[in-house]
Image: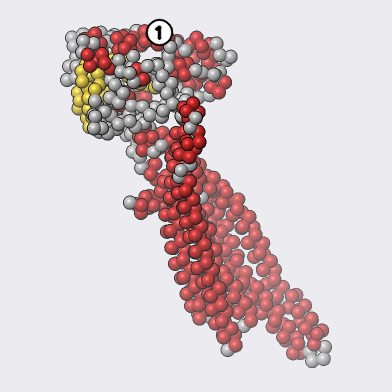
Amino acid sequence: MREVRVRAGDRLVLDAVRRGGPWPVVLAVTAVAGAAAELALPYAAGRTVDVLTGSVTGAATDSSAGGSAGVLDGLTGALLGGAGGWLVACVALVACVMLCESAGVWARGASGARAAALLRLRVLRHVLGAGPAATRRFPEGELATRAGLNAEEAGRAPETVTGALALLVPTAGALVALTLIHPVLTVALAAGIVLVLLVLRGFLRTTTAIAGGYQQAQGEIAARLVGALDGARTIAAAGTAGREAGRVLAPLENLRRHGLALWRANASAGVRAGLVVPLAEVAVLAAGGLLLASGELTVGELYAAARYAVLGSALSTGLGLAGALARARSAGARLADLLAIPRPAYGSRGLAGPPATSASATSSVSSNGRTSPGTPKGETGTLEFRGVAAHGLAVGDLVVPGGSVTAVVGRSGSGKSLLAALAARLVDPERGTILLDGVPLPELTHDELRRAIGCAFDRPVLVGDTIGDAIAFGLPGAPPAAVAAAAAAARADGFVQRLPQGYATPLPDAPLSGGERQRIGLARAFAQAGRLLVLDDATSSLDTVTERQVGRALTADPAGRTRLIAAHRVATAARAALVVWLDDGTVRATGSHADLWHDPSYRAVFQDPAPEHEPHHRESPHQETPGKQTSRGRIAQRPVVQEKTP
């Protein structure tokens, strides 16, 4: 399984290299050009030495009396002659190496930044597109670590890949050059290079596995920290800050263990490579010395061979690149895990007819899909569940008539939030089909689905620059009058108008209470919903008077939209024309609140001492969500659809 993840990460890393724009190309060109210049430098230096030594030797032989003057004359003549050209070539090659190194540093930074940005954007789009499925699988802190730190580490892939390829240029060139000088020298160097490659291969595999564990420990710490910050007030009130700090930092020991393992792997590989390289160079020099003694090599060729031995052993300096590549591979595997989360697929269909334009709330619903004679005919917003089951919740067949006001009630863990998420297609069912006005939700286009359905949550996150932007979020070009009308329906217009700049007040400058924030979230849902309005505990923080006013606005919606409300208060259920009663993960009964009230078990739902039906300001990051059926038949608690105040 780990090998599969690593291979997926490798594909992601290579894709980052391909999408790195011009910078990986610039980096590769500078690296190869610099390596080629380094490769040519020993030859030019050797030719310079040969010309100089030949000229000096000849001058000394011709001058028997004034030997020193003859040598000086020969050296001067050599510099003015052929040696001068080789010396200029050496200077030019050194300048080329320096220029390529400088350009490479610049290109490394640019390519890494671009690759990391592309990876972050890709991961962010995928995670947001996957929606609640991402937070079901990974805690929020873990998601932030992967999209932030791991994306940066994987973004260094272009630098490490091109750097590793650049090291192969002098190595291959050195082998070719030594072959041209004498094949025996090639054999001596090749043996050392093979050993260095084996060391690097083992180091890369070991470090990739260790780096994955190190990054996982970082993610665990981040996830625990985010959870602790979410409950900061509770921790402060309980006086458990020290104990909570210990819990958050508990993975530090695991982090330390993997860090030490990385250091040991690096040190061990460095020692092995450090032993191989000098042996290879000594072998080349020994063979070259024997060949020089036998007259098969010149002094310049021996010098060039020594330099090529050093260049050919440059692979041993690739430990740093191998370590960075290992971290990029393990980080890529962690990003690939995020990208493997399935995203909802959308179709190409639209909804027939205009959205609802008139209010009607005098119908009832049955669990077998048949509606009562009071069901309005021709209304849009009809919601149908056909054999639906998901994450421990069995809905079966259920029809919510268009234009109706429906309350979903039940004890904590019965599946109210999950039913709301299914209706809004924030979660797809494991079995069955959900239709809106006769069209299966997966067959609708993304834009059509989100124009038709508006959602409000208990703790909305407000996105945008201003209050008006937050209400019109997802509705580009919404007219100010529509924004104000939605705010008025949510009873938010009054306090918004009292803000310094009204709807143009920047969000950071708007001190909103929990109830005011909920009303902005409601206004956003009112502005967006064309056919169906889904409210998941969206009035829990409102005071009694405001909740009653909002409830009346929901009941008498002039647009006649279907309203599905996950209700905790008996007043909300009483105002609804129909009620869906969930119990132990199933639809126990449907009907009017007055009819269901005769059942003592139904009355007990609202008499539950648990704080579910009370106005609350929770800090727990969990709410009713999809999960597995527990031994008591309740839905296991896992985060699915929630919005938090940042």
User: Which one is nearer the viewer's eye here, 553 or 171?
Assistant: 553
423 up-or-down from 547: above or below: below
User: Which one is nearer the viewer's eye here, 214 or 440?
Assistant: 214
| Residue at 31% over, 23% down | 412
Query: Taking 494 as reference, is 561 left or right?
Result: left
Q: Give the residue pinned by disc 1.
A: 549
- Where is residue 582, by image quadrant? top left
Q: How many marks?
A: 1
| SS under mark 1 | helix
Where is residue 234? Give x, y as percent: 46, 27
From this viewpoint, which residue is outermost toward the bottom?
A: 64
| Residue at 56% over, 59% down | 31
User: Which one is nearer the viewer's eye here, 32 or 435?
Assistant: 435
Query: Taking 573 as reference, is 189 left or right?
Result: right
How dense is the environment of label 1, judged by Cα within 10 Å: few (below 14), some, or many (20 and up)? some
Colour style of the rendered protein structure: secondary structure
Q: Using the rendered image of the protein, determine whether residue 626 is visible from the camera's viewpoint.
A: yes
Where is residue 92? Give x, y as percent: 67, 64
Q: Using the rendered image of the protein, determine whether residue 17 is visible from the camera's viewpoint.
A: no
| Residue at 42% over, 7% down | 545
| Residue at 57% over, 79% down | 285
185 up-or-down from 545: above or below: below
Where is residue 325? Give x, y as percent: 48, 55
Amino acid type of the residue that numbered disc 1 sits on in the rendered structure: Gln
Where is residue 628? Give x, y as percent: 27, 34
574 up-or-down from 622: above or below: above
121 up-or-down from 559: above or below: below
